[in-house]
Image (tube, grey):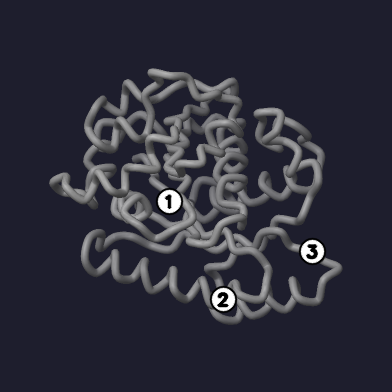
Amino acid sequence: MTKRIAVVNQKGGVGKTTTTVNLATALSTIGKKNLVIDFDPQGNATTGLGVLEKQGTRGSYETLIGECSPLDAIIQTAIPNLFLMPASLDLSGAEIELVGLPFRERRLERALEALETMFDYIFIDCPPSLGLLTLNALVAADKVLVPLQCEFYALEGLSQLLYTIEKVRENFNATLDLQGIILTMFDSRSSLSTQVAYDVRQHLKEKVYNTHIPRNVRMAEAPSFGKPAIVYDLKCQGSQAYIQLAKEILYQEGELAA
């Protein structure tokens, strides 16, 4: 059965796209068939996977408003087993268009029914907001993955997000669950990073992954070459961290022995 994971944080610049692209890549390299849905109007997951926007290309926007089937909006990336539903700037107007459409919060959920047996994992890279696009992702998802930057305001924003997840669970998606928290941009030399990591682990216990994602120059360079960090530089610290994170998730899902 396909596992649908929404990668969410209303704050920008915390590593949502980096996490989506590299985690999907890591799982694809071990034979999992995965789909990345770029649900952010900025389209960073699309360019990060080496796909350039072309006029007439169908993607998440056309799927969401019903202009095309999701099957017609999916393209194969250069990475074996990894597929993409690209984003375009048209997605930036979707929030307004959705207001007048029926079942506006369930558009993505209904569209993904056609893909139920096609993929092992579907990752939804959400925009940095808690608007209708993110709501659609949360309603369509089974689990929520939260990249959390190790900084002062992290816990405050996390509380708001956890409240939103609970409200979605109560009103739209009773089976929605928190997959886990990923500590990103971790700097072992910084006492602040260490303190934030400690506070988050104290608050959410086993929901926080053991693997933390370090600040890493090679990982920051990779998107400009249209490649996930794991492809751009497999040996860098960031790539190795995402490979370790993939193992944690497989273990969590019962697909990997301890």
Q: How far apart are marks 3 and 2 (CA)?
A: 17 Å
Given residues 220 and 243, the one toward you in this image is 220
Q: Which of marks 2 and 1 is in front?
A: 2
Q: Name the residue under label 2.
A: 155
**Disc 2 element:** helix
Q: Is residue 258 visible?
A: no
* Badge 3 or badge 2: first in the primary sequence: 2
Q: Is residue 130 visible?
A: yes
**Amino acid type assigned to the residue bearing label 3 in the image:** Asp
Given residues 25 and 225, the one toward you in this image is 225
**Amino acid type assigned to the residue bearing label 1 in the image:** Ala
Given residues 234 and 45, the one toward you in this image is 45
Circle 1 Cα neighbour tier, 10 Å, few/some/many (<14 / 14–19 / ≥20):
many
Q: In which quarter of the image is residue 28?
A: top right
Residue plotted at (31% across, 24% down): 71
Q: Name the residue under label 3.
A: 187
Q: In which quarter of the image is residue 190?
A: bottom right
Name the spot of residue 14 as percent of width and height, x first.
61, 57
Looking at the figure, which quarter contains the C terminus? bottom right
Q: How far apart are marks 2 and 1 (CA)?
A: 19 Å
Query: Is 95 drawn above or below residue 144 in the view shown?
Result: above
Q: Do the residues labelled 3 and 2 touch (CB within 8 Å)?
A: no
Residue plotted at (38% across, 18% down): 56
Circle 2 Cα neighbour tier, 10 Å, few/some/many (<14 / 14–19 / ≥20):
some
- Furthest residue to the right? 189
Q: Distance between the residues labelled 1 and 3?
A: 26 Å
**Disc 3 element:** loop
Q: Name the residue under label 1.
A: 6
**Disc 1 element:** strand
